[in-house]
Amino acid sequence: MVFPSEEWFQQVREVYNSDRDLHSGGGGACDTTAGFSVGENRYFIEFSGLDCAQVRQCSEEDLEVTDFVLEMPLETWQAMLEDVQKNGKASSNLTLNSIDLELEEGIAFSPVDDQYRQDLFYRYNQNFQDFFDASSRVETTFESQGN
Amino acid sequence: MSEATEMPREHELDTSWMDNMAEWGVSAKPGKRGLTLADIQVGSYGELPKVSDNMTGRPRGSTARPEAYRVGAYQVHTLSEIWLENAEYLYEEALQRQWSSATDIPWHTLKPLPDDVEEAECLLCTFFNEVEFVAGDVPARWIARTTPDYLEARNVLSAQVMDEARHMDVFRKRALANGGGLMRMSGATSGFVGSIDLARDFTEMSTRLHISGEGAVLTMFRMGELFGQNDAEKTMYRLCAQDEARHVAFGVMHLRCLSETAPERREEIECYLDEAEDQLMAGQQNPAGRQSESSEALAVLLGGGIEHYDEGHKKLLVIRRRQLKEYMKRVISAGFADRFENGRSPVPAQYAATA
């Protein structure tokens, strides 16, 4: 599967939803919508209860209704996912929260500039981490590798 | 002959209690998250009185018993005093996102640390032990002061007490698990943090605790993934941060609800925010604030040792900047943006000074 692509996110969603062992302690019920900004591509994700209800490619406008958006350089996404592939889960310096703190402006923002909604990234951080950690079971190649 | 009292062989069964049912025939349906508090807001059971005259502990919606004692002179008996839009949801979220400090932290990843780093971590653990005591004790007092008619908000506070108990124990466990121990107490509980317990009004307490205090601590816990020296510490801080974000959400949503339903109290709330900004956001009791033992410990940890203190201090300033920014945006989200535009709040100037 090539990252970034809708197929890649769909595959990760299937893995995440199919195995509760991938939902670590501190995860649990989560209801939020979020966006991922990956290079030129945009993705919309919805968590509902214990599942990832949907993930799909979307437009920039679609992101405006999300609670928060995670945006980082393509090479940072790639570094994070390569680390997940290598270690089975993100190692401590490449978790979403660590990356957010390392960058002065962070990676999470609310499209409507509402801190309450941006705080959902902090409230549900473990679910998002578990989701990306589930990609360790998805064979991943990257656009930059010429696929 | 037996001296036992002879019981009448027959007595009339009194089933009049069967006639005292409240609204009947209710069939709440579970949703995809099970049967939640939101799902049972049906009929009269979901009707929240704007002012509660319930002083007997009567469960909301049940039939009153005329001879019931007045067991609670509930101080919080007006809806706007404590309500928030998503109380039911926050409570269910708290229940479903509990974690165990015994088994969900990879304690096996703890490794012996250099003395200065271990001492810095143990100082922070001591500090967090102190402040989490306050964060548990204070909501606990307010639960008993709140009418049972507002059970959803009470339950969120009950869940918070459990969260804070876990935070206390996880920091205590960390301090005692890696060759260190507790350090000298910071004394934070005698200043602004302690003053949270002096609040005489629920919103005064919530503004101090949830918005100012826990908002500042939330940034600290999130920062734990940067200064944690191993997976055990990083996990500990990350899971605490999730809980703390939920507590902050309670405060923001309550303040937003109050500002919309009781606008006559806005100036009073501004005064609570004045006090918090003068003390906690700027003061020594904020580990990311002015120089204090705990901010020095943070700088040691962020730098990776006392010899890299300056490097750690630079990182601390960046995080301090973010702490101020997030605080302002939460207050704006709660409906109090004006104070950052009309010069009332000192925080914009503090924020600018960190650039």
Image (spheres, rainbow, N blue to C red):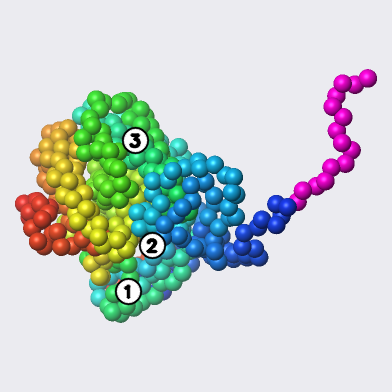
- Residue B354 lies, in percent from the top left, at 8, 51
Front position among marks 1 and 2: 2
Label 3 with label 2: CB-CB less than 8 Å: no
- Residue B258 lies, in percent from the top left, at 31, 59
- Residue B299 lies, in percent from the top left, at 16, 39
- Residue A121 lies, in percent from the top left, at 32, 59
Q: Chain of mark 3?
A: B
Instruction: Tell me, yes or no, whether dots 1 and 2 are on the same chain.
Output: no
Q: CA distance from mark 1 to mark 3?
A: 38 Å
Front position among marks 3 and 2: 2
Q: Assess disc 2: are there few (<14), some (14-19) or many (≥20) residues with their C-alpha within 10 Å of its C-alpha.
A: few
Specify start and end residues of the magenta stretch as a single range: B1-15
Compared with A40, B168 (above or below) is: above
Residue assigned mark 3: B133
- Which quadrant of the view contains residue B337? bottom left
Q: Chain of mark 1?
A: A
3 or 2: tag closer to the N-terminus: 2
Q: Amino acid type of disc 1? A: Val
Front position among marks 1 and 3: 3
> Furthest-front residue in view?
B66
Q: B237 and B55: which one is in front?
A: B55
Q: Amino acid type of disc 3? A: Phe
Please give the label number shown on residue B250. none
Q: Chain of mark 2?
A: B
